[in-house]
Amino acid sequence: MESPIITSVALTKYYGKSEKPSLDTINLTIFKGEKFGVFGPNGAGKTTLISLLCNIIKATSGTIEYTFDNQKKNIKEKFNQVGFVPQDFAFYAELTAKQNLYYFGGVYGMSSINVKEQTTHLLEILGLTSVADKKVKSYSGGMKRRLNLAIGLIHSPEIIFLDEPTVGVDIHSKLTIINHLEELNKKGVTIIYTSHHLKEAEDFCSRVALMDNGKVIALDTVSELIKINNAANLEELMINLTGKELRD
Amino acid sequence: MNKLKVSLVKEILLLLSDKVGLLLMFVMPLLLVFIITVVQDSAFKLVNENKIEMLIVNKDQGNLGDSLIDNLALSGSFNIDVSNELLEDDIKKQTLNRDKLIAILIPKNFTKKINQNAEKISNLMLTEFGVLDSTNVLAKNQSLKNNNLDFYFDPILQESFRISILSGINTVLVGIENRKMLQQLFTDLGYEKIPDHIQKELGKQNVSINSMPASNGTSVMVPNSSQHNVPAWSLFAMFFMVISLGGNIVKERLSGSFVRLQTIPSAFLLTIWSKVLVYLFVSLSQLTIMFCIGMFIFPHLGLPELKMPTNILALIVISVLSAYAAISYSLLIGVYAKTQDQAGGFGAISIIIFAAIGGIWVPSFIMPEYMQNIGMISPLHWCIEGYYSLFLKNGEWNELTGTLIYLLLFIFGCQFFTFIKLRKQNYI
């Protein structure tokens, strides 16, 4: 029996005085060890959903429950088991990769020895060892993207949220990132992932939620969704379900 | 503890990588304090120690014009160049060309007028004493026109400086008139001249002025350009951290680092406190460096030595509160500004305005009353009030109450609005 790691009930979010919800009554269960994809056109509510699940913004109504192996008393401690890789580069470009990883590892409460070991490991896996002591502002786009991922993984989280982790990188960096995520998933890490690369998502995700206008309009394994909706692939399925009109 | 340590290390590394910010925080105050002190000290010396270039055109047909020139020369304040052949236009040209800062045109009736005035007063006095008949006196009183001294000055000359020069000339003039009057009195009484023993006594100045700055306690703080400028411009430069700290916060906010920190328990507040601690250290280092330069380097450069107040604890408290006020203001700007340019631009301009209305550039007491009232909102006004109490008056705690209360309120206000904004954005 799969055990849920995140359960959201009637999760709703209104921004400011808007009468239209950005997220409308989302009921979702994500299971431990899943590679869960969240897809949809621009403005569908993907980032809002991820931001709510990561505790970056507060829901207008509804609840989110986290069930970790290592149960913690309060939400703050629980979030030490969550990793977040935002679409924007969320690090300090004036520092080196090592300094960034030491800092973020430190604020997660890791011991110095742990941080150093994990830093060496991640830099090695993600191909950044040779530039570890160079300032990040001198890195290429692919190197920055890999460092962005490394920081989200420094504290060995149980769940990792990835918002467009491979956007704007070359095929080599993309493969390195995807391979490492596959490795982590094999070790039991739950991955929640958004991307515009639907082919990549189709190959990577075990289950996907398709969103439009703040609602989940389809939720199942990729193969099941394609089969039920009689589509050739995830891209065709998305067009069929959300229409062809432009979204901004 | 490790969390705080890594946060502090990160802030220090970020600060060290911000070369422009470091220049603004450490080199700018040094230059400011040095330049302003030298300029003000030079102005002070120009008035009090250096001789002022003066042109005199003496058209007087008597001997008192020469006497005036001799007395002005004896005063030691002027380097006098006498050119009697010059016309009014030539005098104006020379002062405008800055060959001479000031010029005096002594009119042809100068001696005659002084003599006439002396006669008039002597007659009035003798009539009053009953020695002369009053009808005799009225007949002698006739006025002469166009007998004033003309004083020309370079328009760049500041009003206070001009008034001080005029006052010096007036003193010499009054001396000549008085002496002439007395001489006339003795002549009218039948003497050939003022008796020598009286002449000798007249030359003495029996009452001199002791100039003493008001001060608390036994030690006297002598106001000079260092006592005024080192604390004032150090504070001004300290508040300029808004460019570095405010910009740093906007940068982190926009780069996404803050969003990542939001997902890490307690990390956000830890980051803010680390910034506060690092910048507090920076501010106090700035002040320490400035004060040390005032104390140990300035005397070697011919500038007055900065004397530290006796109440060192009060100095530390005011310094820490001033630094914390500057940090709180920078945090406020950092969380409300939408871009780094906005934080830098608004921050810098607001500090300049705070300094101007707060009495850093010119003392508050010479401003109009409404401007003095507006100046009360400036944190720099209260910081400098506190420092002036200590550096110029050797002030005690009771004189610092206003400063302490205002600074605490200012800090609370900035922190409160920073908290509101961060709360609204779900950072804390």
Image (tube, coloured by chain):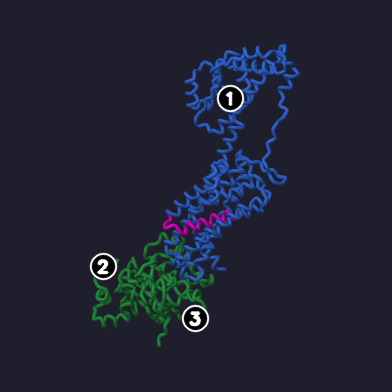
In the image, residue A215 above or below residue B278? below
Give the Cα separation between the discs numbered 2 and 3.
Answer: 44 Å
Label 3, secondary structure: give it.
loop
Name the residue nearer the viewer: A246 or B271. A246
User: Which residue lies most toward the bottom here?
Assistant: A1
Chain A drawn in what color?
green
Residue A246 numbered mark, or none? 2
At 47% from the left and 20% from the top, the residue drawn is: B89
Amino acid at dot 3:
Asn
Residue extent of the magenta highlight: B321-340
Asked whether residue B338 is drawn in magenta, I would say yes
Give the Cα separation between the discs numbered 2 and 1.
Answer: 85 Å
| Mark 1 lies on residue | B79
Q: Main secondary structure of the magenta part?
A: helix
Specify the subunit that label 3 lies on.
A
In the image, residue B120 above or below residue A173? above
At 53% from the left and 70% from the top, the residue drawn is: A112
Local crowd at mark 2 within 10 Å, few (<14), some, or many (≥20)?
few
- Mark 1 and mark 3 in contact (Cβ < 8 Å)? no
Residue A32 numbered mark, or none? none
Name the residue nearer the viewer: B358 or A157. B358
